[in-house]
């Protein structure tokens, strides 16, 4: 059996683990929730005296309190901010820790403060500016009302009572816990790891695997044999929304179970974005003009054009570049086979903070396309994919006269909760009210990840409320990236219909 030592996230104390701890105890394990100094009422302290190191010492003390002679293995569980003191303690007691569980949180690195993991991008920038000005003391106030918790993660699965409880027992977070860098010697790298992804908060196994498949070296560690993953179909606080399910996952993690990710390259299956486009098309040469590649059909011009905008974020060093991916090139050639110019476009969406830059890149690329003499500048369609769906916002809110149609395949149509973009303008579900007569063609994957599917549902509802010209094309058994993942007989009819619709809006 095991000893579970659990550390709560920002603003919360040991109380959030009560139900989960009871479930673990009923299964025969020990479970201890660590009261954090200056946050949990059991360990009061002045905020100026509390930093990340203080909380690391709290967790180290909990480890040292476990009787070595019992033979029980220690599993450290860190939720949200709690993973920072967990990793710091595991690094100092690596020989005593059997596993670290990252509960709906990232992978903190040596020398990086917890501030980097604050999900709300606007708030993170404000706090960084404050720290840069030397104002490092004081506290960060907790959410003052139940609805304000969404800035810190999805509250899916929490009823009104749970949200009221979370709010009533929330405590200010000492600034030193967020600003003090995490210091690791490297010893923790030998400790097995399990990640628990709360899918309603925006992350799932499919999205993590796609990031690994892009070849980012920073994510290669996620494919090591000692790393496993689980999913929970809930929001950011599973210890409150589904404590029994969480306890079951923790027990299975402690036993070494879980999903393993495949490494990029080598003998691994070809990732979805690099698989061949699944049907034959005429081989049309690529004409590269700066950030855009044009696939121009034979014959006299100028012709309408469809500009295909890839998703992301995609690491800056990913090769081949997205505009060269078989899916994007296949779409461009399919458009050219229909008599219009197909275009793939490069933009710099390398991180969640890059949407402003990517939006500017797309706007610039579209103008380059319109300026090409082979293109009818007054007949343009834009087609977005996956995480590029947020880039539809500006075009929906204020569609120019020359934009004859907007299409999207398996798009993200509102920022996912964990992305921290609530304060940005990139909310297509809000922007669609400004679309007017702009035709919108939406390809929906029936087996979409829950978090993304929820954004599509919200968009469709908003489009209906404002009588937008939405054509919804379902791929009932389709997955995210269905063109190369699923059987052509399942996907081609939908894609052919979508392409015919887009071209008809361009040429009609």
Image (spheres, grey):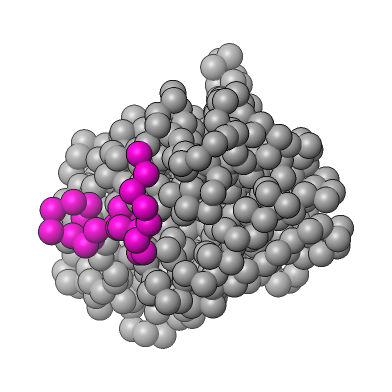
Residue 468 magenta-drawn? no
Q: Position of residue 397 (x, y in %)?
A: 78, 41
| 60 versus 448 height, above or below | above
Q: Position of residue 49 (x, y in %)?
A: 51, 31
Indicate the quadrant where residue 3 lies: bottom left
Provide the residue span drawn in magenta: 262-285
Tally the numbered discs.
0
Residue 275 magenta-drawn? yes
Q: Position of residue 306 (x, y in %)?
A: 57, 44
Indicate the quadrant where residue 363 lies: top right
Q: Kindly identify the residue that appears in the image at 36 percent across and 64 percent down.
A: 279
Please say whether residue 370 is visible from this viewpoint. Answer: yes
Q: Main secondary structure of the magenta part?
A: loop
Q: Kindly identify the residue that appears in the image at 41 percent across and 40 percent down.
A: 323
* In the foreground, 249 or 214: 214
Q: Kindly identify the residue that appears in the image at 20 percent across and 47 percent down.
A: 189
| 247 versus 16 height, above or below | below
């Amino acid at each position: 059996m095991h000893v579970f030592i659990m550390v709560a996230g920002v603003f919360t104390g040991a109380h959030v683990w009560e139900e989960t701890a009871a479930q673990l105890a009923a299964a025969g394990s020990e479970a201890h929730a660590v009261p954090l100094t200056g946050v949990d009422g059991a360990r009061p302290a002045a905020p100026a005296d509390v930093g990340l190191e203080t909380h690391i010492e709290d967790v180290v003390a909990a480890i040292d309190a476990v009787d070595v002679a019992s033979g029980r293995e220690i599993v450290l569980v860190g939720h949200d901010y709690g993973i920072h003191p967990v990793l710091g303690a595991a690094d100092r007691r690596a020989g005593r820790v059997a596993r670290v569980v990252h509960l709906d949180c990232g992978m903190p690195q040596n020398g990086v403060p917890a501030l980097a993991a604050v999900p709300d991008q606007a708030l993170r920038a404000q706090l960084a500016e404050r720290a840069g000005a030397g104002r490092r003391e004081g506290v960060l106030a907790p959410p003052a009302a139940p609805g304000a918790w969404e800035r810190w993660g999805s509250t899916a699965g929490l009823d009104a009572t749970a949200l009221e409880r979370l709010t009533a027992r929330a405590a200010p977070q000492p600034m030193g816990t967020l600003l003090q860098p995490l210091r690791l010697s490297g010893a923790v790298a030998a400790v097995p790891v399990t990640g628990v992804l709360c899918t309603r908060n925006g992350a799932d196994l499919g999205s993590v695997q796609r990031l690994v498949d892009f070849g980012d070296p920073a994510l290669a560690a996620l494919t090591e044999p000692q790393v496993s993953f689980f999913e929970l179909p809930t929001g950011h606080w599973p210890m409150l929304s589904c404590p029994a399910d969480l306890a079951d996952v923790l027990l299975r993690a402690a036993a070494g179970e879980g999903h393993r990710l495949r490494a990029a390259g080598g003998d691994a299956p070809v990732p979805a974005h690099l698989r061949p486009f699944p049907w034959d098309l005429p081989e049309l040469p690529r004409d590269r003009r700066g950030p855009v590649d044009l696939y121009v059909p034979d014959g006299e011009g100028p012709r309408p054009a469809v500009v295909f905008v890839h998703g992301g974020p995609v690491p800056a060093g990913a090769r081949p570049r997205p505009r060269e991916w078989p899916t994007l090139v296949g779409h461009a050639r399919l458009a050219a086979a229909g008599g219009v110019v197909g275009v793939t476009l490069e933009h710099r969406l390398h991180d969640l903070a890059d949407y402003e830059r990517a939006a500017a890149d797309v706007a610039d690329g579209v103008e380059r396309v319109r300026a090409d003499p082979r293109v009818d500048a007054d007949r343009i369609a834009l087609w977005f994919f996956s995480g590029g769906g947020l880039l539809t916002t500006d075009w929906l809110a204020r569609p120019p006269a020359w934009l004859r149609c907007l299409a999207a395949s398996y798009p993200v149509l509102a920022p996912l909760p964990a992305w921290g973009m609530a304060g940005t303008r990139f909310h297509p579900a809000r922007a669609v009210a400004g679309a007017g007569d702009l035709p919108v063609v939406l390809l929906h994957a029936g087996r979409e990840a829950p978090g993304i599917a929820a954004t599509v549902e919200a968009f469709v509802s908003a489009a209906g409320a404002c009588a937008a010209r939405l054509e919804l094309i379902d791929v009932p058994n389709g997955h995210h990236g269905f063109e190369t993942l699923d059987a052509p007989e399942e996907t081609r009819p939908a894609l052919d219909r979508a392409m015919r619709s887009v071209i008809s809006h361009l040429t009609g």
